[in-house]
Image (cartoon, rainbow, N blue to C red):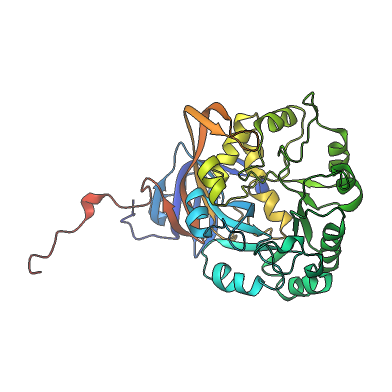
């Protein structure tokens, strides 16, 4: 509802929610006020009279806008529009994972990044054309110098390097990607299923650097666990080296059996992401809230899930101004409902099997740069009864 009083220090006031902001060590019931597109105050009992718009979010969870490290908005045939699929899910920042390479990035920026309300960043594919067609098999198109030059040209938008899907026997794409990342000071994300000439252990222990990231960490195609559901020792060794592990849910890269066993053995992901594209949304509802729900059902604690969906990915991409509710930070906020009921969650890569749970995380409201861009139940809106009568002269 809109305040009628004259003292209005804030543009928007979210009242009474449970605020979880891991970057600032906040987990409790607070109000959140915004002004001029930025976080103005997180505090107790902020007067409603001080805000132009007040939204009652009691009973809900207020977090920084979610940060999705792995999505597809360009290049891939099943890519999606960021605003249509991110903002309704509380995701205010997303990273396109390798859709564009150095030859196609400028078009990606013009068509997708620049017009988007969502903060869209890019992992630049080591393949010059990115995921357009099948260029990820073309070694001649994987140029270290040109990839590094494009990253150096747009460090504001390109946050890392992506290597994926190569079917050949050798390590050339990965090593070239690592070299380009090394030269530009960014991290590398790899999506590479093991084959006999490229085993996972060698990839993680010999080719990746600390800070580099393995996505699809709970995938059947990259099995973290053995036949007895035990996490393979070299995954722990890689983590000890500083290799990061990202969920990257997707349409074929998340197994409840692997994830459950790994989480129970203490191998939780470093970051939570969706690998969102048309197939993963339709079959598995691979949004940020749904992926977070699956990890909640498997035993992770909500604050840990929020941290790996906000602050940790923001740091991974080198944007610590995001993923937190610190004063003067961009007012990117997700309001989530941890609803109770009888729900079925669907995995993939192992036959789209269902996991039953009594909780589901649903996005109720998204605030981007201080503007309410998604409000599922109209909490920030005036009641319909305030509609003025029609003009009888018309």
Name the one closer to the observer, 218 or 319: 218
Which residue occupies 57% across, 74% down?
110
Against 127, residue 327 (above or below) is: above
Whole-percent x, y for residue 235 in the image: 84, 38
Whole-percent x, y for residue 177 in the image: 82, 61
Which residue occupies 84% across, 42% down?
239
Extreme residue toward the right, this view: 206
Q: Using the rendered view, name the quadrant where residue 109 is placed.
A: bottom right
Name the one closer to the observer, 358 or 64: 358
Q: Using the rendered view, name the quadrant where residue 350 is placed.
A: top right
Against 15, residue 181 (above or below) is: below
Left or right: residue 233 compared with residue 104: right
Left or right: residue 226 compared with residue 253: right
Query: Is residue 37 something one can see in this rendering?
Result: yes
Whole-percent x, y for residue 247 in the image: 68, 43
Q: Using the rendered view, name the quadrant where residue 268 is placed.
A: top right
Against 128, residue 249 (above or below) is: above
Name the one closer to the observer, 4 or 164: 164
């Amino acid at each position: 509802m809109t305040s009628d009083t004259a003292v209005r220090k804030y543009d928007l006031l979210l009242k009474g929610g449970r605020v979880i902001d891991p970057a600032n060590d906040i987990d409790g019931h607070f109000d959140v006020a915004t002004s001029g597109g930025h976080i103005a105050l997180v505090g107790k009992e902020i007067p409603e009279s001080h805000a132009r718009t007040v939204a009652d979010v009691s009973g809900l969870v207020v977090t920084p806008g979610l940060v999705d490290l792995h999505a597809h908005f360009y290049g891939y045939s099943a890519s999606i529009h960021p605003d249509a699929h991110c903002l309704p899910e509380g995701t205010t920042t997303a990273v396109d994972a390798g859709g564009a390479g150095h030859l196609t990035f400028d078009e990606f920026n013009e068509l997708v990044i620049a017009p988007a309300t969502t903060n869209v960043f890019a992992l630049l594919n080591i393949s010059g054309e990115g995921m357009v067609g099948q260029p990820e098999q073309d070694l001649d198109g994987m140029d270290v110098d040109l990839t590094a030059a494009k990253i150096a040209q747009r460090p504001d938008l390109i946050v890392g390097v992506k290597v994926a899907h190569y079917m050949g026997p050798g390590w050339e794409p990965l090593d070239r990607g690592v070299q380009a990342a090394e030269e530009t000071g960014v991290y590398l994300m790899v999506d590479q299923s093991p084959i006999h000439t490229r085993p996972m252990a060698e990839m993680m222990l010999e080719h990746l650097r600390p800070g580099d990231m393995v996505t699809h960490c709970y995938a059947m195609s990259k099995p973290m666990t053995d036949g007895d559901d035990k996490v393979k020792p070299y995954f722990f060794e890689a983590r000890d080296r500083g290799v990061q592990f990202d969920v990257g849910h997707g349409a074929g890269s998340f197994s409840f059996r692997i994830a459950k066993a790994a989480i129970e053995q203490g191998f939780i992901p470093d970051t939570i992401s969706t690998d969102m594209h048309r197939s993963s949304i339709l079959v598995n509802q691979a949004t940020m809230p749904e992926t977070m729900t699956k990890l909640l059902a498997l035993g992770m604690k909500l604050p840990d899930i929020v941290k790996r969906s906000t602050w940790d990915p923001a740091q991974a991409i080198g944007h610590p101004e995001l993923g937190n509710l610190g004063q003067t930070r961009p007012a990117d906020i997700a309001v989530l409902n941890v609803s109770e009921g009888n729900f079925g969650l669907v995995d993939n890569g192992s036959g789209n099997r269902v996991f039953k749970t009594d909780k589901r995380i649903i996005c109720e409201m998204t605030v981007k740069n201080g503007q309410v861009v998604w409000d599922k139940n109209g909490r920030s809106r005036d009641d319909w009864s305030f509609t003025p009568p029609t003009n009888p002269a018309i």
